[in-house]
Amino acid sequence: MTDPRSYIQTILPRNTPVAKEGRAFAPANIALCKYWGKRDEAFKLPLTGSLSVSLGRLGTHMRIRPADRDSLTLNGTEQAPASAISRRLFGFLDLFRDPGTALAVDSKNTLPTAAGLASSASAFAAAVLALNELFGWEADSDTLSQLARFGSGSACRSVRHGFMEWHPGERPDGSDSFATSLDADWPEFRIGILTVSNAPKPTGSGEGMKRTRDTSALYRSWPDQVTGDLPLIREAVRERDLNTLGRTAEHNALAMHATMIASWPPLIYWSPETLAALHRLHALREQGLPVYATLDAGPNIKLLFEHPSAHDLLREFADLQVVNPEEF
Ligand code: DP6
């Protein structure tokens, strides 16, 4: 097995700019069937498949230009070269560019910063889409997804809008591990972003999944959970069956959190407000409102529902940000 850079160089035709700049937008995505755990760290290969939906206009706009020196401007503010964010981004760009190719990166997130939504998936996907233009790769969507994966696993699901399934693949070089579109439309489907806390998460996803894998006895059952959930979720999206989708996605997210809580030291991403909001949601469901929840590695909740329920939900959760994935 080679290292990521050597592998990537075998599939890319060019590693120097052929255009004046590359510009792209990539949407954030929310997993309905979660990715939690890798079979290979360096190549960011997952243990299981996963399935997500994109967040419409919420994501990252990125512009990359050749320059005299590397620089990163994030939401209008230049970042120090030694900052964690600059090091992570340029470490990623090093996988693709020839040594000596300096780049100026201008990145803008349309994700509300306070919502605690991860911008890494949309940022790495936007970077790959922008490099595709700048370097003239003319790569197809499967290849772009594979390349984005090296930044953050979930970024492979952000190279296109809509419902995306990440196929875990089996090969050690990850050439069969990328996301494809379900090509499903669901005009009524909505995501509600419920921000209960904007404190930074204490343990990042990569570290959290490693700890879960290494120390949580419950994690052994996680691949079986995904094997059961993924086909149900895929089919429910195709059938526009909110109840099956919501039930399965909520169960999947809570099962993932159970594996996290059973780690040592424990990974408890929830705050008291998370639990309170879940209880309110369950009460609404008891009253007949078709609404479900999913949660990532943090305290905030994403509601899954259809357009006709938006009015009732906004009355209950005044700060809810409603997203139509098909509006972009
Ligand atoms: C809980 O893609 O951020 O959001 O591959 O280590 O960068 P790395 O992790 P990342 O993990 C996302 C985990 C999740 C579930 C999901 O999006 O599927």
Image (tube, grey):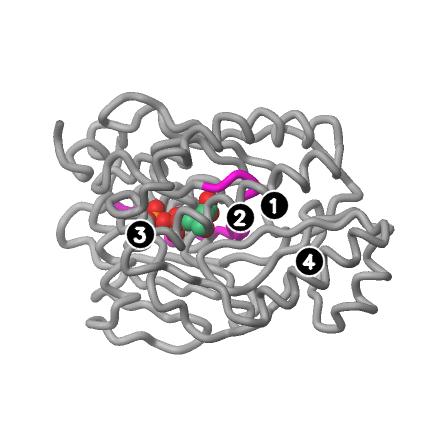
Highlighted range, magenta: 16-34
Disc 2 is placed on an element classified as helix
Dot 4: what SS? strand
Describe residue 73's horizontal placement relative to residue 30 as left or right: left
Residue 250 disc label: 1
Residue 17 within the segment the image draws in magenta: yes
Q: Residues within 10 Å of mark 2 (few under 14, many from 20)?
A: some
Mark 2, residue position: 254
| Magenta: main secondary structure | strand
Q: Cβ(mark 3) to ligand 1 < 8 Å?
A: yes
Q: Nearer the viewer, mark 4 or mark 2?
A: 2
- On screen, residue 122 versus residue 79, left or right, reads right
Label whose residue precedes the other's in the sequence (3 or 2)? 3
Residue ID at (24%, 45%): 214
Amino acid type of the residue that numbered disc 3 sits on in the rendered structure: Gly
Amino acid under disc 2? Leu
Q: Could you say whether the residue bearing mark 3 is in a helix, strand or loop? A: helix
Q: Can residue 232 be spotted in the picture?
A: yes
